[in-house]
Image (tube, rainbow, N blue to C red):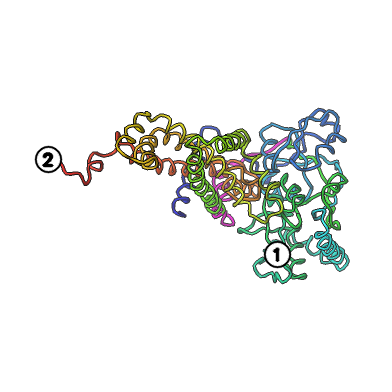
Amino acid sequence: MKKFLSLAIITSLLLSLFISFSAPLSFASESSEGEGIYKTLDDLKGARIGVQQGSFYADLVNERIEDANISYFISLVDELNALKAGKIDAFVAEEPTLNAMSEGDDSFTFVPEYLEEEYYGCAFPKTDASKALNAQISEYIARIKEDGTLDQINDAWFGEDETLQVIPDYDTLPATNGILKVATEPEYPPFEYIRDGQVVGFDFDIVYRFCLEYGYGLDIQMMSFDGILPAVQSGKCDFAISALGITDERKESVDFSESYYVSRSVLVVLKKEKETTSFLSSVVAGFDKTFIRENRYMLFIQGAGTTLLITLSSILFGTILGFLVYMLCRKGNVVANMITGICVYLVQGMPVVVLLMILYYVIFAKSRISGVSVSIIAFTLVFAASVYSMIRMGVGAVDKGQTEASYALGYSDISTFFKIVLPQAIPHFLPSYKGEVISLIKATAIVGYVAVQDLTKMGDIIRGRTYDAFFPLIAVAVIYFILGGLLTLIVGRIETDVDPKRRNKDKILKGVKTDD
């Protein structure tokens, strides 16, 4: 499997080179200097401003910038790439994050006028059980503020000495008082990000020290930023820490701990002038950042493994469930057909991402079931609905005379279905089945909404570290293409084996005596 995915990564590099030659990219060098295109907030009147989904920046921008045109993005890296592509004129970020983003890319700066100060805190569900944990963390934060520990953590993660940025060993946490589930978006350096496969950063240095002192284990739930507060509200996690600004509106939904950091939000804009590096050095640097540095190719492998697990499990369980439901409805039972019809209508008529989030945040809200399990359940239902419809179509294409002739020969109803009808129906719906398999593996790209680190999410995490959309997106696309091709070959081989018109003559006649 690792060799196969390594081949996919190499293929992605070749495709990247091909695309790059057809549409050369421009990369800013570290030596580029220049002022920002906009110098004051007034200069941005009527401008296109990017904000991150789930943040409160839209209201802030509307208050400070007249006639602002707001665009919403899932992550900071999407905002940065939109800025470089000219899709937006500016976007909102915190000053420390901007400094991390500018490492190796000096093509942007910020308007020298702060929007607002933000106070960061941990978010907790509004339950009695969470109040004790909130009190513990708040007491700990207040104490490390007084004894200088918080200043040491601040100097380590916001300074230039990387030797002070120690990667926590979460496996060594005592867990004598239980394991805490914490939600975060690991695409926000230096507060939280992935390094060598581990979540690190300013926020998690605090969390690790707290768990170590109070006897907790740690289960980190990585998800999109706009899914963090719903996860807290629904009780899917014990608390969240992800550079969350404390606001009055958020306090209506969740409780916050003592503030542990004060940040200033700024508007990021492009510089007037920038120098570009050579194409070859840009390609080499991009490949190194995406695949080699911090062993990031392992993230692609892990993500592809999760995607395959969800896809293959959903295909297996969905096929079984769809077939069983058809068997229940085959003889025309009114109640069974009515219930099945309603369920199929709901599943097929609802966007998969909505179904996924309803299962995760509503139906299984109080359960500790993992995001991977919820994803398998959701896609099993989707695939089962398709299988049920396909079997009905395939069986309907078989002439009724086949059934009548089988009964005349003394076959039972079950024997008739499995020996006569189903073998003839399978070739009719297998092409559609193959198409559903390909659609399924692509549809799983949304599971990052429910804290699943699939292939797409791992690509997002890497983009959040490199702030480069090109190589990670090409790599994800190529790996999806290869995985889909493999599944297509497997289903295609099954299609050939069950279709008498396409099977090898020797295989069909195997075991049958013929006269030479």
- Residue 195 placement: quadrant: bottom right
Does 202 lie within the magenta span?
no
User: In this rendering, would 227 be left or right of 501?
Assistant: right
Kind of residue at badge 2: Asp
Q: CA distance from mark 1 to mark 2?
A: 73 Å
Q: Position of residue 75 (x, y in %)?
A: 69, 43
Furthest residue toward left: 516
Kindly identify which residue carries mark 1.
179
Q: Secondary structure at mark 2?
A: loop
Mark 1 Cα-neighbour bin, 10 Å: few <14, some 14–19, many ≥20 = some
Kindly identify which residue carries mark 2.
515
Q: Which residues are magenta?
A: 272-298
Residue 320, placed above or below residue 67: below
Q: Residue at x 58, y 49 (%)?
A: 454
User: In this rendering, would 481 be left or right of 108?
Assistant: left
Q: Quadrant of the C terminus?
A: top left
